[in-house]
Amino acid sequence: MTTRFEITNQEIQTAFLNVLKSTDFSKLTINQICDEAGISRITFYRHYADKYDLLSAINTTQINTLKKYIQNRLHQKDISNALLQMTEFLEHDAEIMKRLFEIKHINHQDSLEYKLKNLLYDEFYDYMLQEQQIDIIKGMPVAYFSELYAANATIFIKYSLDKGPNPQLITSLNQLQKFVFEFLKSD
């Protein structure tokens, strides 16, 4: 059962995202969030230290959701379905996700894009070490391939947010991943 605290927390996050649609994060105020949520500043501060703390919570939620799609993607030979599901998820909240990606300079915390790249890097790196049990591929460190994977996947996600699902792109990325994994397995 959902508690009143959890309901208010969700209302604050929704209000923040609604205000963010029309206001730059740097200019966004606690009062705007409180007015949108219909709560007092005291109530806001029971939930979050400031707007940066709220942003961090929202970014963490987004990363945790994307993590499910990313983990699913690595363990499939045909990633078309996983990519399609991810782009459909992204399309649902594309405007908000784009706004969250636009926030680059955050007070003592990592941006959504930075967190996403780290997640992608870590997932690929761990996959290669655990599944392939190698740390050097064709003379190149797995860390290098992990950086490439993270950059490519981040570009795909941002492109999908901007342009929407693209079946041809998904097919091409699926073929690219198959090619890369075959290359990695060959001697």
Image: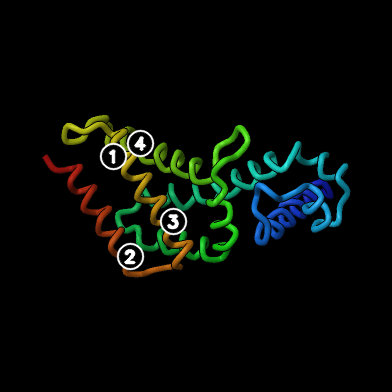
Which three-letter amino acid code belongs to the residue tagged 2?
Leu
Q: Nearer the viewer, mark 3 or mark 4?
A: 3
Measure how far apart labels 1 and 4 are at the Cα level. 8 Å
- Is 11 left or right of 130, judged from the image as shown? right
Q: Which residue is mark 2?
A: 169
In terms of sequence position, does the residue under pointer 3 or pointer 4 come before the other?
A: 4
Q: Is residue 51 above or below residue 10?
A: above
- SS category of the residue bearing label 4: helix
Vertical position of residue 40 compared to residue 166: above or below: above
Q: For numbered disc 2, what is the local secondary structure?
A: helix
Give the foreground label among 4 and 2.
Answer: 2
Residue sitting at x 63%, y 35%: 107
* Residue of label 1: 145
Q: Which residue is mark 4?
A: 125
* Amino acid type at mark 4: Tyr
Which of disc 2 and disc 3 is earlier in sequence?
3
* 47 relative to 173, above or below: above
Decide if residue 1 is in sight here: no
Q: Which mark is residue 157?
A: 3
Query: Is 11 on the left-hand or right-hand side of 26?
Result: right
Residue 18's x, y, as percent? Answer: 70, 60
Whichever of callouts 2 and 1 sits on the residue coming sooner in the sequence is 1
Q: Amino acid at mark 3?
A: Ile
The quarter in which the C terminus is drawn is: top left
How far apart marks 2 and 1 lie (CA) works out to 21 Å
Q: Nearer the viewer, residue 78 or 57?
A: 57
Lower sequence index among marks 1 and 4: 4
Please identify the quarter of the rendering in which residue 21 is found.
bottom right
Identify residue type, mark 1.
Phe
